[in-house]
Image: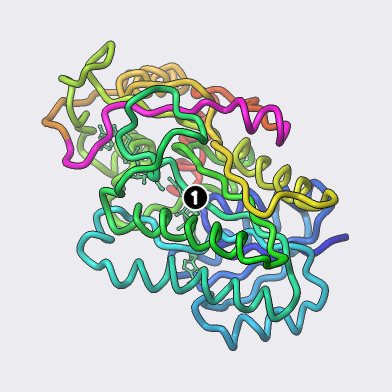
């Protein structure tokens, strides 16, 4: 059973990927410093798998500690690197915190991987690298644009670092997955997203409002050039997204994989904010009251993925609908409230 090191494996997307890796016969090894997670995520993973998963409480920017993990674990067949900070607003206020964790953390990991001759890497990138696209849907050929936050810039820089390493003749083989908007939770409701403080993201804000933790959702902008005036995104179920990581690891195991590849991971469907509210009402069978407000600074009016490349080359497919995603987010919110 090949060991796959999962940095940030106690986080939202990482925990679901750990479960899917184990389901696919891999041995996931978590590395997480718990800067944005809690022990309960490990408990949830163990309950789902009915066995414990190894977890090293280590900061990926600490080369010595990371080396100790590689030494202790021995044969590591590949790495999936989720560990990063992701709060866009916080990155504007504290850019160095983001460049240190998201950029220096990647460089440290790459150095330790190289020293240990580990050559397979799956990297968490983001649709944020496309900025405000001129044409929809976006393909992997759509030009990337100047990032509109330090967070977004760290993802652009990280991709450039990976591309430079790939063209240096290094034996590193990387697949960068550009996620669109991950939503939902595991069907067991034992793992899910743990937003810190007041959520900025739409779905946790909706579920917290429905649970009575927030007064009301404000729809940011209803005057966009979209069918109902609200912004459009591509909301992909986190379990479908997690499975894409397993597919990426399998692709890297093939003989002579390309040195660096990127794939969009979304559903290929755009949904507006008001579509999400309606789907949430359907999923819960209850009306959901919201208010409308002005546009949020920095929001992209509309973006959704062309997933042809991931479908054809990774065998990626989505099996869970927006309504199923929202029903699972709601079940997770209720589990959190218990
Ligand atoms: P998350 O915060 O839930 O998970 C990240 C995990 O990494 C957390 O458990 C945190 O404790 C850990 N971590 C952070 N810095 C670390 C460090 N230096 N060393 C060890 N562990 C560290 O976030 P997520 O939503 O699961 O995102 C995972 C990755 O996907 C991130 O790289 C994020 O930028 C990227 N991404 C997320 C989204 C999204 O909307 N959630 C979209 C696109 C890309
Ligand atoms: C979705 C839509 C909001 C909250 C962010 C990051 C991006 C990325 C994913 C990592 C938008 C609207 C939201 C609310 C609302 N991740 N909204 N009321 O903006 O697509 O992307 O997370 O790489 O980098 O920028 O996601 O969930 O914040 O917003 O109307 O209270 O919901 O305006 O149209 P976004 P989101």
Please give the name of the residue rendered at 24% of the width and 37% of the height, measured from the top-left corner: 299
State the SS at label 1. Answer: strand
Q: Is residue 310 left or right of residue 256?
A: left
Q: Is residue 79 above or below residue 134?
A: below
Can residue 308 be found in the magenta stretch? Answer: yes
Image quadrant holding the N terminus, namely bottom right
Please give the name of the residue rendered at 50% of the width and 41% of the height, measured from the top-left corner: 179
Q: Is mark 1 within 8 Å of ligand 1?
A: yes
Residue 39 visible (yes or no): yes
Q: Position of residue 61 (x, y in %)?
A: 49, 78
Please give the name of the residue rendered at 42% of the width and 70% of the height, measured from the top-left corner: 101
- Nearer-the-camera pick, 62 or 287: 62
Residue farthest right in this picture: 1
Disc 1 target residue: 125
Q: Is residue 259 left or right of residue 83?
A: right
Can residue 50 be found in the magenta stretch? Answer: no
Tell me the quarter of the picture where residue 311 sits. Answer: top right
Q: Position of residue 53 (x, y in %)?
A: 73, 64
User: What residue range appears in magenta?
Assistant: 296-315
Q: Is residue 208 above or below residue 22?
A: above
Q: Position of residue 111 (x, y in %)?
A: 60, 77
Is the stretch drawn in magenta largely helix, strand or loop? loop
Tell me the quarter of the picture where residue 212 sits. Answer: top left
């Amino acid at each position: 059973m090949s060991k796959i090191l999962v940095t940030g494996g106690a986080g939202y997307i990482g925990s679901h990927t750990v479960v899917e890796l184990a389901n696919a016969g891999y041995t996931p090894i978590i590395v997480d410093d718990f800067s944005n997670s809690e022990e309960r995520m490990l408990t949830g993973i163990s309950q789902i798998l009915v066995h414990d998963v190894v977890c090293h409480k280590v900061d990926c920017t600490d080369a010595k500690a990371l080396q100790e993990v590689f030494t202790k674990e021995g044969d590591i067949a590949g790495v999936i690197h989720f560990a990063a900070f992701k709060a866009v607003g916080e990155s504007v206020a504290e850019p160095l915190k983001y460049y240190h964790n998201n950029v220096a953390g990647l460089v440290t990991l790459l150095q330790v991987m190289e020293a240990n001759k580990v050559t397979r890497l799956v990297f968490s990138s983001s649709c944020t690298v496309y900025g405000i696209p001129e044409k929809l849907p976006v393909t992997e050929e759509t030009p990337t644009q100047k990032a509109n936050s330090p967070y977004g810039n760290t993802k652009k820089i990280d991709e450039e670092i990976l591309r430079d390493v790939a063209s240096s003749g290094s034996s590193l083989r990387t697949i960068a997955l550009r996620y669109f908007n991950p939503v939902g939770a595991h069907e067991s409701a034992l793992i899910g997203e743990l937003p810190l403080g007041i959520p900025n993201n739409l779905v946790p804000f909706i579920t917290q409002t429905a649970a009575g933790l927030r007064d009301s959702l404000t729809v940011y902008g209803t005057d966009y050039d979209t069918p109902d005036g609200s912004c459009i995104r591509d909301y992909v179920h986190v379990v479908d997204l997690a499975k894409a990581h397993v597919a990426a690891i399998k692709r890297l195991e093939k003989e002579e994989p390309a040195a660096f590849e990127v794939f969009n991971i979304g559903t290929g469907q755009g949904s507006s904010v008001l579509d999400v509210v309606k789907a949430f009402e359907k999923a819960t069978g209850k009306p959901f009251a919201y208010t409308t407000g002005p546009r949020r600074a920095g929001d992209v009016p509309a973006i959704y993925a062309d997933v042809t490349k991931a479908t054809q080359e990774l065998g990626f497919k989505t099996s869970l609908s927006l309504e199923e995603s929202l029903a699972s987010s709601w079940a997770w919110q209720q589990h959190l409230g218990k």
